[in-house]
Image (spheres, rainbow, N blue to C red):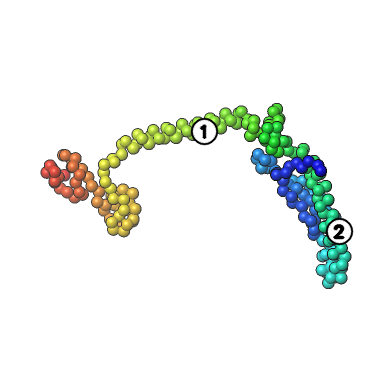
Amino acid sequence: MSQFKFADNYQDLSQQDGVDAGFQFQFHCERCNDAWRTRYKPYRSGQASGWVSKAAGFFGGVLGGASSALDGLAQAGWNSARDEAFQEAVTDAKGHFHRCAKCFQYVCAPCTDKASGFCLNCAPDVEVQIAAARAQAESQGAMEAAVEEGLKRGRKRDVKRDVQLVCPGCNAETRGAKFCPECGHKMAVKSNCSGCSAEIAPGTRFCPECGKQQ
């Protein structure tokens, strides 16, 4: 028994019977998944059976016996014909794929480092790695700078002031606005006394803590 190659990176597109009966196989790179497809090879026995079946239907089943006989011949010869076609396909695929000397996966030419015989997963392109590392570091640096800028802005925000986040009139979200964006209801935003900084309710004319007029 011959050694079976390309065991897990191909798709059998062959069709056993019918007027389109034939053999075709599609192989894919195990790194980038790009596909290469063999030329279509007709299966004459299956095609003949398909044409006779069509003719039998056209003539009202007169050729039914011949059709059944050809079906039997086509089915009997399918396995050996398919194996032969697949071996030819594997031979052709060897010219399009390389087997990595390290991970033993079959990869296409663009995914192969010709100098080492490795795939680019096992022997990554140095220039690509440098560019990727630089881009990753640039993104990380930008995020760190954004965090610092956010901290600066956050320190300037008034975090002591209480705000109504939901309108008491229509229950809409206000996002801290002084007036409801949906119904115009005035929000009850608390403030602080200009004299003693005590918290006072909206509309208060004199501070209840120090008596200063607001």
Residue 124 versus residue 54 in the image, above or below:
above
Determine the secondary structure under disc 2: helix
Give me the residue at 53% from left, 32% from top. Answer: 135
**In the image, which disc is placed on residue 117?**
none
Q: In the rendered view of the protein, which quadrant contains the C terminus? A: top left
Taking the spot 69% from the left edge, 36% from the top edge, the residue there is 104
In the visual, does 28 lie left or right of 129?
right
Q: Residue 73 — which label?
A: 2
Q: Which residue lies furthest to the bottom in this view?
A: 60
Which amino acid, mark 2?
Leu
Q: Dot 1 surroundings within 10 Å: few (below 14), some, or many (20 or more)?
A: few
190 above or below 55? above
Q: Residue at x 36, y 35 (%)?
A: 151
Q: Nearer the viewer, residue 196 or 11?
A: 11
**Quadrant including the N terminus:** top right
- Residue 39 in the image, given as x and y percentages of width and height: 79, 47
Q: Is residue 83 left or right of residue 125?
A: right
Separation (CA) of disc 1 from disc 2: 62 Å
Note whether residue 25 is visible. Answer: yes
Horizontal and vertical percent for residue 59? Answer: 85, 70
The mark found on residue 136 in the picture is 1
Q: Is residue 152 above or below residue 21?
A: above
Residue 143 to residue 174: above or below: above
Secondary element at tag 1? helix
Badge 2, how many Cα within 10 Å: few under 14, some, many 20+? few
Choose top left, top right, bottom left or bottom right for residue 194: top left
Q: Which residue occupies 78% across, 41% down?
A: 3
Left or right position of 21 against 138: right
Residue 191 at x, y = what percent?
Answer: 22, 45
**Kind of residue at badge 1:** Gln
Between 116 and 110, the one nearer to me in the picture: 116
User: Is disc 1 in contact with disc 2, using a CB cutoff of under 8 Å?
Assistant: no
